Image (cartoon, rainbow, N blue to C red):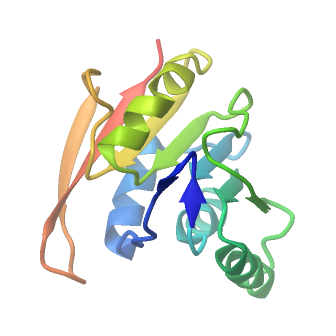
Amino acid sequence: MRRGGGRIPFVPSPMDVVEKMLSLADPKPDELLVDLGSGDGRIVISAAERYRCRALGVEIDEKLVEESLRKALRRNLLDRVRIVRGDLHAYELADANVVALYLLPKTLKALKPRLLSLPRGSRIVCHDFPIPGVAPDEVAGVRSLRDGRIHRIYLYEIR
């Protein structure tokens, strides 16, 4: 899979990490959560199920888009979940209230201007890697039961 001229691997976040990411970001039912590089859809589906928000996944890999849509359909979430095939570097974020990311520092650096221009009150939640040069509002550690490793979660609130 190629995104923005570079290869970004799909590495799924463990579900206990996803749960912590969502609890920190705390999406509301009237908000839109956008997951850039949504992979198999686990973050958008969990957000729509647990927080009843609208959730949008942007994924370039067609097979992962199809897998995500099947999962959302099986859970009867297509009224709140959208998965689009697209390049995370080009996708418009203006309507996002929460942006979820599990991306490498180089990609986060490239997205930084767009992320920091989100509307006031928006939240950004990053798994394992902080946005370079930006101080997070909160940092949490989660020892995943899946891999035993401590995962860092960074929360940013746009003021």
Q: Position of residue 6 (x, y in %)?
A: 48, 52
Residue visible at 74% across and 31% down in the picture = 95
Q: Classify residue 113 as left or right of residue 78.
A: left
In depth, the one of 79 and 148 nearer the eye is 148
Nearer the observer, 84 or 96: 84
Q: Measured along the vertical axis of the image, is residue 98 above or below residue 69? A: above
- In the rendered view, does 120 fall on the left or right side of 80? left
Any part of residue 52 in sight: no
Judged left or right of residue 137, residue 81 is right
**Tag count:** 0
Q: Where in the figure is residue 140, as x and y percent of width and height?
A: 21, 47
On screen, residue 157 versus residue 84, left or right, reads left
Image position, residue 159 (x, y; %): 47, 11
Residue placed most toward the observer, 110 or 76: 110
Q: Is residue 11 above or below residue 142?
A: below
Near-viewer residue (106 or 28): 106
Q: Residue furthest front?
A: 5
At x 69%, y 83%, the residue is 67
The N terminus, quarter of image: bottom right
Residue 88 shows in the view: yes
Which residue shows up at 76% across the image and 76% down it?
69
Residue 57 figure quarter = bottom right
Residue 61 sits above or below residue 37 on the image: below
Write the residue at 57% across / 53% down: 3
Q: Is residue 108 above or below residue 34?
A: above
